[in-house]
Image: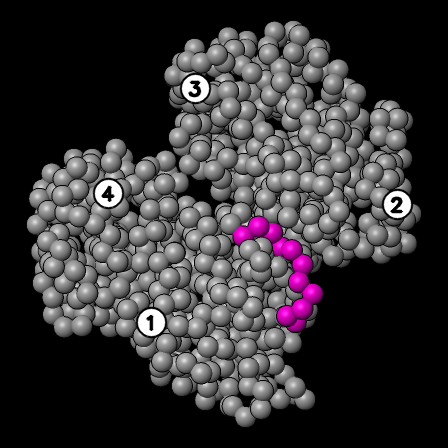
Amino acid sequence: MEFCKKCVIPETAETNILDSSNICSVCKQIDKKKKINWKERKIKLDNLISKYKNHSSYDCIVPFSGGKDSVFTLYYLVKNYQIKPLVVRFDHHFLRNKVCQNTEKVINKLGVDFLNIKTNFEIVKKTMVESLIRRGDFCWHCHVGIAALPIRTAIEKKISLLFYGEPSAEYASFYSYEDEEVLNVEKFNKTTNLGINAEDMYQMIKERYPKLNIKLDDFKSYMFPSQRELKINNINALYLGNYIPWDVKKQVKIIKEELGWEGDEVEGVPPEYDYEKIECMMQGVRDYIKFLKRGFGRTSHLVSIDIRNKRLSREKGEDLVKMYDGKKPHSLGIFLKLVNMNEKEFYEIIKKHVVLPHKIKNYEDFLKSDSNIKPRDLDNWEKKFF
Amino acid sequence: MSFIRIIPSLLLSKKKLVKGKNFTNHINAGYPSTTCLALESQKCDEIILIDLDSYKNIQCPDFSSLSEISKIISTPLTFGGGIKNIEQAKKAFKLGADKIYLSQTLFNNKDIISKIKKIFGSQSIVAGINIITHNQKNYLLEDKEKKIDIFEHIKSLIKCGVGEIKITYVNNEGTNKGMNLDLSKKIISIIDLPIIFEGGLGNVEQIIDMIKIGANSFAIGSMIIFKDYNIYKIKQHLFNKGYKVRF
Amino acid sequence: MKVGILDYNACNLSSVFSSLYRLGINPVVINKSEIIPKMDKLIIPGVGAAKNCIDYLKYNSLIEPIKVFLANKPVLGICLGMQIFAKKLYENGLSEGIGHIDGEVKKLNTKINFNIGWKEVKFFKKIDKEIKIENLSSFYYCHSYYLSSKKNDYCVGISYVEKNSEIPAIIFKDNFIGTQFHPEKSQINGNKFLEFFLNWKRN
């Protein structure tokens, strides 16, 4: 398996393409960032915001998780433009204590309306099993809900604009920095829903559990609006990261200082990265599955960003990866209990989804490779579900 | 040099998509129109839609699913499975199909080719060749008496005016064990028309093996239904290896 | 905006209709010449044989209304729908086209006489930027005849059928835009092109 010569991401990464000299496309794209005229972009942002402001009951919807990006985005818009947003969160049932605490603080300090929506957990669990089996990724309901629900809310409440945070180009190379206001069905079907739409999932679950009493309507929150619906309702999206340079470390400092936002420890990741992906109880399992399938985990991803921004040497990055990637998380026990599976069944399912040329570690090694990071709130999670 | 074509091959049964092994054990593979939308977003080059029930003569072709799908996607669509006459072909074209797939009909109604050709052109006809292997010899699936020479059959169809050939290796379907490279090589050397290969592809390496012997169009099924592969990733992998794919 | 699609038993009517519908338009299917002047834009789809098409248009008195419309409002011709605007068409005998484009429609003289599949389009005059796509984006073709013209100033994009064999992919003349490729079958590139046509005003 080949690795990028600059960062530590291998060829098995989702959207990365290694060129003939083994430099990955994300590393190459970072250089593009320097050629952007940010002054011009800021003026464009000013104009766009005044175009949308004060036209309906809310200026825009800010899709929210409570993580660093959505918090910073919300903060920036309210503080700099006095935007009146409707903050909308799709609650995937796995929100950790700290992110809930952070959310309360942020919402209260900024003074905004907040809508938190949870969907039927029995159905969620079934979708987790189905998407794990079919795609080796159990987070379907989350990918889809986070994408679709705010947009459905926008249509329902006649709010034309959705304001997102980071540009998609920082981490992946599906889209380049030049794209603006890209909100369409293609992106959803290409990158978000694992190729499975709500209608497909409904059919698949119905087949697997024939006695279950469910209707297509129960999956409404997961249905992405059609291109025509988006067009007719004039739904547009803006990405803050397309108009201001996106500096994660600087932004985290701001929200910590200004809003009292706090970081948290994450399974499988060095403690200094206490700001990334701290929202989800299942993050550890998710990252571990990625390691089993592709041969690299969240630490590889995080150190690569630092390497690209010249904050870390490749050598030091490799050391951190060796220490933290690929250790079986404590949360796996909770996950398996939720979906009613044992370790062997889990391993066999993941094995089918390994991305070549990576080879999954053998079962004995899998059983042995325990993580030593036990999240402080892990016992709370047990209490929540069982 | 033409693009490598990656074409999802979808089976319709009772208005749902299904996929199985060796023509049995079909399980649900998604709702037709939304699955096609997903495949389009993943940059599939075309879509082949075969009505399994109609192929088995259980009922007429599922035109309503065809119509629903063609309303949602902007991708070239080949429709088939049990199309028996020119009226059904005309209806399929009217509802949004770009090409018609014919296989067992060609054994007793070769005339349909010239009728379709006159109105819609040769490029709209894909002839399906289903190959089974028995005792290391290759036969056509529909040829119960094992008398017909595969190549003579194909040549006669070309003479009638089909525009494209689709080869399905029936024994390999859903097995992910790869394709018959020697036979494929022979077919490519003899047939001058565009050829689509299906049956047995389970990973990108197997696709590359076929490209190396001269194939450039692939119909895939279980690889995208039961695995985490999506068309875009497959193309990306091929691109990484230096092959010409369309994004 | 009223967008009319001409119905002359061409097979990709439903696909063109659906593409426009998804872009938020309510297209009008036109099979009577009286409706043509009421439209703001006209689209002429096309699959099938040239002679059939021209005969149908003549028999149903559609040629004059189209010419009158074209004098003042935008028309998009797709594939055969573009070719009928040439002077002469050589499929199934010789037919006389609408004559807006000074050219002839001849059979492809390549090894395989069909051009089916995706081909890159090389755009000129920065048309790619106007359509908001990258130059050399691919579009879907399905034809065996092509528009040949000595005057090349209205050709703003070409595709290579074989190594040295090029065909016009897209032509602009006065209020007319013609594409040899099928935008309704060209996924997101095709959608962007159709949006471009919907917003297009002749300079």
Pointer 3 chain: A
Above/below status of C183 relative to A53 = below
Drawn side of residue C71 relative to residue B197, left or right: left
Magenta segment includes C37: no
Per the model, the C-alpha gap separating discs 3 and 1 is 55 Å
Above/below status of A160 relative to C117 = above
Colour treatment of the image:
one colour
Pointer 4 chain: C
Extreme-bottom residue of the structure: B147
The amino acid type, in three-letter code, at marker 1 is Ile
Identify the secondary structure beneath mark 4.
strand
Per the model, the C-alpha gap separating discs 2 and 4 is 65 Å
**Highlighted range, magenta:** B21-32
Q: Which mark is residue C4?
A: 4
Q: Residue B111: horizontal and vertical position, in percent?
A: 36, 80
Per the model, the C-alpha gap separating discs 3 and 2 is 48 Å
> Local crowd at mark 4 within 10 Å, few (<14), some, or many (≥20)?
many
Which mark's residue is nearer the viewer, 3 or 4?
Answer: 4
Which residue has dot 2 on it? A369
Which residue has dot 1 on it? B116
The amino acid type, in three-letter code, at marker 2 is Ser
Q: Quadrant of the N terminus of chain A?
A: bottom right
Dominant secondary structure of the residues highlighted in magenta in the image: strand
Above/below status of C113 relative to A83 = below
